[in-house]
Amino acid sequence: MSEIIHDELFGTLAYDESVRWYRGRVEFSPGFRVELCVSVEGVDPSVAIECARQIFPQVQKQEASLRLAAAFEKLALYNDQWSQGERIDAAEFARRITLSSIAVHSEGEIELWYADGDLFAGHWISVSTDSQLRIQFVELTG
């Protein structure tokens, strides 16, 4: 397996054997880069990278709505248990969290990882979707 792939869309992706994926920093929007991880577990790397190429533009188009859906999903948890009296709405929640990483799994499932914007004391917010970008679940991790 090649240690480094130079991709036209993603740039340089390096293979991490410990987790069986390629990873690199990619431009998500002008001036904003995120980590991209592409799983090659059980598939040819060229197939996995092509899957990521196909889904990436859709993630770019739908990220704001996925972020807002995650905000609605975790808003009550924040307001009821973490806010220390500072109640916010879903729009403010979505404004505070920041996309950090995108993982594309071999069957096309996607995970979006968000920095929590100090809403949950530094925990990460993970949004897992199917290959059609339908949210399967939203978790607080770390």
Image (tube, rainbow, N blue to C red):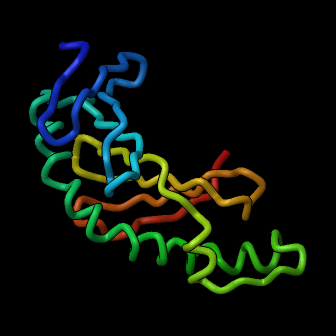
How many badges with numbers are in the image?
0
Q: Position of residue 9 (x, y in %)?
A: 16, 42
Q: Nearer the viewer, residue 75 or 117?
A: 117
Q: Quadrant of the C terminus?
A: top right
Judge from the rendering whether residue 93 lies leftward or rightward of residue 100; answer left or right: right
Question: Which of the 4 image quarters holds residue 46?
Answer: top left
Residue 6, how many percent across, how many down?
17, 25
Question: Most extreme residue toward the right, as rendered?
Answer: 84
Q: Residue at x 89, y 80 (%)?
A: 85
**Left or right placement of residue 10 versus residue 115 in this view:** left
At horizontal 62% and vertical 75% (from top left) the residue drawn is 93
Above or below 100: residue 65: below
- The quarter holding residue 104 reads top left
In this view, 54 is above or below 37: below
- Quadrant in which the N terminus is drawn: top left
Residue 122 percent across, percent down from the top left: 72, 50
- Where is residue 83 drawn, in percent x and y? 82, 73
* Quadrant assignment, res 76: bottom right
* 55 with respect to 91 (left or right): left
Residue at far front of view:
31
Q: Identify which residue is drawn at 71% across, 83% down.
A: 88
Q: Is residue 103 above or below residue 75?
A: above
**Image point (41%, 45%), residue name:** 34
Of the pair 39 and 64, the residue shown nearer to us? 64
